[in-house]
Image: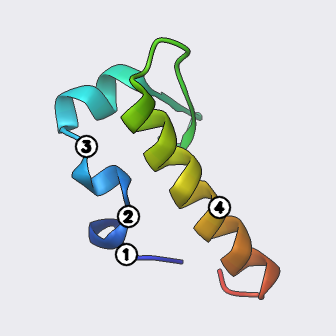
Amino acid sequence: MMAYSESELAKISMEDFWKYAIFDEWGIIIGVKEDAPAEFKEAYEHDKKIEEEAWAKGID
């Protein structure tokens, strides 16, 4: 798992983060809203890919 400060989403303003992120019942980001800017969507997809690769290697 990567540190939040190293994620692409960390570069997004907190205002946009709360505006465009979709959260589960535990407050974990699980997606982005359709009207999110391309920069936000790309950051989310990038971080999601890194996370999935870590899980595949057994890193939690």
Badge 4 crowding class, 10 Å Cα cut-off, few under 14, some 14 to 19, many 20 or more, is few
Task: Determine whether label 1 and label 2 are within 8 Å by CB.
Answer: yes
**Can residue 5 be seen by looking at this rendering?**
yes
| Residue type, mark 4 in image | Lys
Give the answer, above or below, for where 35 lies relative to 52: above
Q: Single out the mark in the foreground, 1 or 3.
A: 3
The picture places residue 41, in percent across and down from the top left corner, at 49, 35
Residue at image coords 77%, 87%: 58
Task: Determine whether label 1 and label 3 are within 8 Å by CB.
Answer: no
Q: Residue beneath label 4, please? A: 49
Residue at image coords 28%, 55%: 10
Q: Single out the mark in the foreground, 1 or 2.
A: 2
Q: Calculate the distance from the C-alpha at mark 1 to the C-alpha at mark 2.
A: 7 Å
Q: Residue beneath label 2, please? A: 7
Q: How is the image coloured?
A: rainbow
Please, what secondary structure does the residue beneath circle 4 have? helix
Badge 2 crowding class, 10 Å Cα cut-off, few under 14, some 14 to 19, many 20 or more, is some
Q: Is residue 3 left or right of residue 5?
A: right
| Residue type, mark 3 in image | Ile
Q: Is residue 5 left or right of residue 23?
A: left
Please, what secondary structure does the residue beneath circle 1 have? loop
